[in-house]
Amino acid sequence: MDLGDDLDAFLDEVESKFGCNAPSKNSSACGITTSNVNRNTWDRETVDTSGRHRLSKDVEALLLELQTDDELPPAQVTNEAGGATMERKATAGKKCCPVFIGGTAIRHGLGTSTSQRSCDQLRCTSCDFRVLMFDDCAWDSCDYLFLRNNVPDHEKLRSRLKKRRGVRAYACQCNWISSEEVSDLQGLPRLHWVCGQHPA
């Protein structure tokens, strides 16, 4: 099979998957005419309005499905047939990139590479618990079983913390750390913590 036959087979498959009648050369079952000489050039003048309307709705649906709430700003989508408009809304929250932890001397909030703030919205992807923080405390003796049985009870967790100025203790149900200096979580692979999103 040469390249032309491969292209013909591919185009026939695409036409059949998108609801066209049995395709053949010079077929206009979808309102799209193809050429015998060059099948990859489309005669756009022959697209009927119902096909354009259906295609436009499909494109809108795909765009709405692919849009992530925290990446795209709100926008209006109108279809080419002049139909109703739909409003896409982005959530108000933002995520830290990269994610930092640190002691009490480090401000907490939304962190970026330029403003290294300690994230206060951490969530563990292993145990699916929110990460708890204790200012001016460090872990004295801690183990997995203790955390598993006591997170998120702050009072029970305090029994294993000791006062230490400038240090912030972090814990979820499966991991713990005490930090005084700012640290990027990418450098701490044992911690499966991510930013859970900051409110605007």
Image: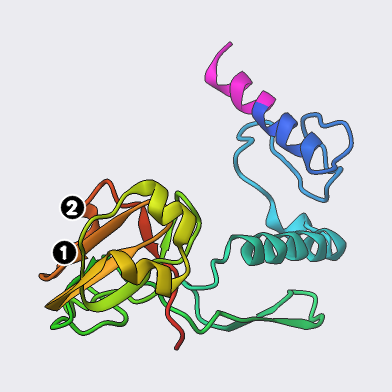
* Residue occupied by mark 1: 183
Residue 113 visible, this angle: no
Q: Main secondary structure of the magenta part?
A: helix
Categorize mark 2 by other alpha carbons within 10 Å: few (<14), some (14-19), many (20+).
few
Categorize mark 1 by other alpha carbons within 10 Å: few (<14), some (14-19), many (20+).
some
Q: Is residue 8 above or below residue 120?
A: above
Residue 199 visible, this angle: yes
List x then y, in percent, for residue 81: 80, 75
User: Secondary structure beneath disc 2?
Assistant: helix
Most extreme residue toward the bottom, as rendered?
A: 200
With 173 as the anchor, is 42 left or right in this view? right
Q: CA distance from mark 1 to mark 2?
A: 7 Å
Quadrant in which residue 67 is drawn: bottom right
* Residue occupied by mark 2: 187
Q: Is residue 103 above or below residue 2?
A: below
> Pointer 1 and pointer 2: residues touching (CB < 8 Å)?
yes
**Amino acid, disc 1:** Ser
Q: Is residue 58 above or below residue 26?
A: below
With 139 as the anchor, is 63 left or right in this view? right
Mark drawn on residue 107: none
Bounds of the magenta segment: 1-9
Q: Nearer the viewer, residue 113 or 187?
A: 187
Q: Is residue 38 above or below residue 85?
A: above
120 magenta-colored = no
With 39 as the anchor, is 12 left or right in this view? right
List x then y, in percent, for residue 66: 59, 60
User: Secondary structure beneath disc 1?
Assistant: strand
Quadrant in which residue 91 is drawn: bottom right
Q: How is the image coloured?
A: rainbow
3 magenta-colored = yes
Quadrant in which residue 177 is drawn: bottom left
